[in-house]
Amino acid sequence: MLFSALTENYTATYLFIVSDKIKTAHRLEPGETVEKPVQSVLAIFNKAQGRVREMLMKGLPLQEVLDELIRVIQETHPDMRGSVLALNAAQGTLHPVSGPSLSQEYSALINGAFIGPESGSCGTAAFTKSRVLVADISQDPLWAQFRKALDYGLKACWSHPIFSAEGEVLGTFAMYYTSLRTPTTAEVELLELAAGLAGTAIEWKQVLNERTLLEGDLRKANEELLELNADLDKRVKERTAELVYQSQVRQTVTDNATAALFMKDEFGCCTYMNPAAQAMTGYTLEEVVGQPLHNIIHYRHPDGSAFDLGDCVLEKALLQNMKVRGHEDVFIRKDGSFFPVSCAASPIQENGKLIGTVVEVRDVSQERRAQQEVMESSERFRLLLEAMPQFAWTAKPNGQLDFISTRWIAYIGGDEDEGLGESWVRSLHPKDTEHALQAWAKALNTGSDYEAEFRVRRYDGTYRWFLARALPLTSKDGEVKKWFGTTTDIHEQRLAIQKLAEAQEQLKRTNNELNQKNRELTQTNADLDNFVYTASHDLRAPIINLEALLQVLEEDLTRDTVVEVSGLLGMMKGSVSRFKKTIEDLTDISKTKKSQAETKENIILSELMEEIRESVQELVNISGVTITGGFSEVPHFLFPRKNLRSLVYNLVSNGVKYRSAARPSVVKVSTARIGGMVRLRVQDNGLGVAVENKEHLFGMFKRFHDHVEGSGVGLYIVKRIVENANGYIEVDSKLGSGTTFDVYLPI
């Protein structure tokens, strides 16, 4: 009958919770629907309920009961694997209780799993107190940390929290499937009912366990109480006359006392309580006399745990024959409510023998409430001050600091008392101390607001600027009761203002210097351009004349004479050619400086490469160098044609000129898109350049191989073209292996 009533009551409560309080969290794929419930759900539940009821009435272990419940539920589908997990509410973890069809390895794997918003179906259901339906474990984000379940053939999991009659989560009931499954309405109903039935079984077992323990405790307590009462009755009879006399004396003294007075005999049993004690506890003397006072008003703690008699200070006072003063404790009224008290206990002796104890009790509820309110208010105020980014502080009317936030302690690196009283002055900069104290003294004397700027020494010895402000809290008649202040770090603002002024002055000087330099550089560049142009123009005519004179001289000389001076004539012609080349290079440098504003063209790189091959064809024929091009990734882009041709020509001709005789020479030209830039790469397997010479590679008139003719301005021109185009160039070269030039140009 007890089980039936409990089951019916619990089921009704459970169904109410499901309908009114349980939120369902399930995941359905687009287009999926939940079928209408079928009649078989009730039949399955009735069968499971009957088996659970029968096993519980037989007193079978909880695991066996839940195993049978799961087996009955599993009859609905061959792929189902049921599971019941118990919740450890204190730790927030789940632990297997039943899972007859699940792998023991998997049960061990999930043992102790934490609940949370993304902790699988069961962990999430226990955390959110709502049903969780996962049709595909491999895809659902709730199972991101528990994909190991797939290794045990588990592909879907529907879980429902198991609730107690009070609505607390006891655990979860889960239906695993070895195939992807979305529940029907009937299956959702069955899941809810199964979870409710599991909760009934769990609570039933808890009730039986608690009942067994309680019956044992009661039996033992009754036996002890019977023995105690028997002995007490004997003693009471023997001393009745004496107690009557003592009672009359106590009655006279205590009836008029305002404090609650209790008297106990040597066994701790109450023999008397005055009217104030009766009013305080709600008990009458008749209700408590002859009973252990501890068991009446002191038997358990406010948290519900038992208060052991051996831990009671008032009992120790009796047993150890000692006095107790100012002991604070909590007593229990007749209506079960707790109230704080302050107690004093004094032993009563007669002829040197302990015969009892008198206990004086004062209800301190109002005092405690007042203290609590003061403490809460103080704590709120302290937290508010600590939360401020400034150093918050308070001071007495005389200016002595009585509170300063921990931010001050962390800043100066002192102990907890550093800064209180007048010790804060020790942290000020010596040059600022007098000013700060004068301003503080003026505020204290006049009751006006305080404001001062000064430097404070940090724990590492450095000083920073701070702004201190304080306001007085005054009474109605204007008397200062308290000072409330803050000290704010303004170091950066002070430095910023100072630096701004310095920067403005420096900027003014720099602008003047830059303007002067720009004028000088503009004039210098103009002079250089004029010089280069004039030199190349004025020197060109004499060189042409020299070249013509040499030709005429060679024609006028006889054959024999020509043979004799042919070496000299060759040297003269070579010198003239080199001079002409130098003039051309100077002209190119001048043109490079003026080429920034030239119009960009869409240059097809394969066509440009053919032009360059024709230009160096004679040198290619002599050297046998192979020149290849690969422009599939970037076949064309916008750039001034003349500049790009000069750039590629100089890099290719360098690769041809500085070839290695030890191997067939190859010069490769290619393009690639790197970010928002075009990378033009020219790579050769020639002589290469030593590491120590790389930084001088683009210098004007710099050459590192003297066996080949050259002016040393080609790479200088290349760099100028690249920089004028807002690009950059990188070089990777190894002596004896070759050189790679990577030119990066904006698209």
Image (cartoon, grey):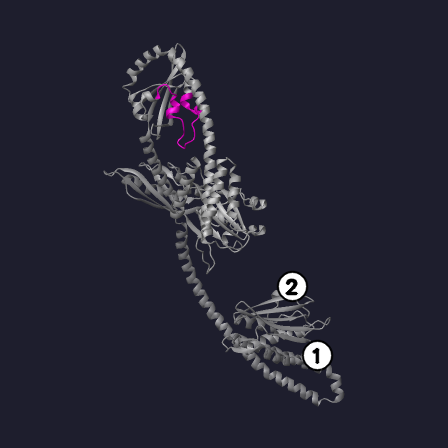
SS class of the residue under badge 1?
A: helix
Tell me, yes or no, if residue 713 can be seen here: no
Q: Position of residue 453 (x, y in %)?
A: 36, 47
Asked if the residues shown at circle 1 and circle 2 are in contact, with their CB atoms under 8 angstroms apart, the answer is: no
Q: Amino acid at mark 1?
A: Ile
Q: Amino acid at mark 2?
A: Val
Q: Nearer the viewer, residue 170 or 625?
A: 170
Mark 1–mark 2 distance (CA, rounded to whole Å): 30 Å
**Image vertical order of residue 402 relative to residue 82, above or below:** above
User: Alpha-carbon neighbours of circle 2 within 10 Å: few (<14), some, or many (≥20)?
Assistant: few
Q: Nearer the viewer, residue 88 or 692?
A: 88
SS class of the residue under badge 2?
A: helix
Query: In the image, which disc is placed on residue 631?
Result: none
Q: Nearer the viewer, residue 455 or 615?
A: 615
Q: To which quarter of the image does residue 278 belong? A: top left
* Residue at the left extreme, as displayed: 477
Q: Name the residue tied to disc 1.
A: 622
Q: Position of residue 162 (x, y in %)?
A: 46, 44
* Residue 359 among those drawn in magenta: no
Q: Name the residue tied to disc 2.
A: 691
Q: Position of residue 376 (x, y in %)?
A: 35, 37
Q: Please report the bounds of the magenta region as a residue range.
A: 288-315
